[in-house]
Image (cartoon, rainbow, N blue to C red):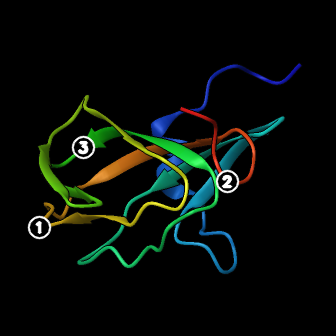
Amino acid sequence: MTSPLIARDAAASMPLEAGRLSSLMKRHGTMELRWYAPKGSDSQVPHDKDEVYVVVSGSGWFRCGDQRVPFSPGDALFVPAHEMHRFEDFTPDFATWVIFYGPTGGESP
């Protein structure tokens, strides 16, 4: 069994995966744990799985569909599969864990 600890410092130093805006830290079944720390702007597109962001540092605004909410460290944000979303007006120290999970197309509500 590998260590259960996935340290923030290790995540922050991981290179981006080719063709991705985040670093893969752990895969287990349908779950992927990634580290996402965009610089300047967030250019991501909708994903084909449900996802949860857990904000580690920084603050700003999160747009999901037609909603726009403020975020800060410790906040969790849910995005259903295929929903347009992005981080906006965030501070330079912004970083978040991203957890993708479930079947392609998302889980049933």
Q: Amino acid at mark 1?
A: Asp
Which numbered disc, 2 or 3, marks the residue that appears first in the sequence?
3
Q: Considering only vertical position in the picture, is 9 above or below 62?
A: above
Residue occupying the point 60% across, 67% down: 15
Q: Residues within 10 Å of mark 2 (few under 14, many from 20)?
A: few
Give the mark, 1 or 2, whose residue is nearer the N terminus. Answer: 1
Q: Amino acid at mark 2?
A: Gly
Residue lying furthest right: 1
Q: Is residue 59 left or right of residue 7?
A: left
Q: Quadrant of residue 88?
A: bottom left
- Residue positioned 30% across, 73% down in the render: 39
Against 95, residue 26 (above or below) is above
Q: Are marks 1 and 3 in contact (CB under 8 Å)?
A: no
First in sequence: mark 1 vs mark 3: 3
- To which residue does mark 3 refer? 57
Residue in the picture at 55% in, 53% down: 81
Residue located beneath label 1 in the image: 89
Question: Which is nearer the eye, 33 or 15?
Answer: 33
Q: Residue 26's spot in the image, x, y percent?
A: 71, 41
In which quadrant of the rendered image does the N terminus lie? Answer: top right
For disc 2, the marked residue is 105
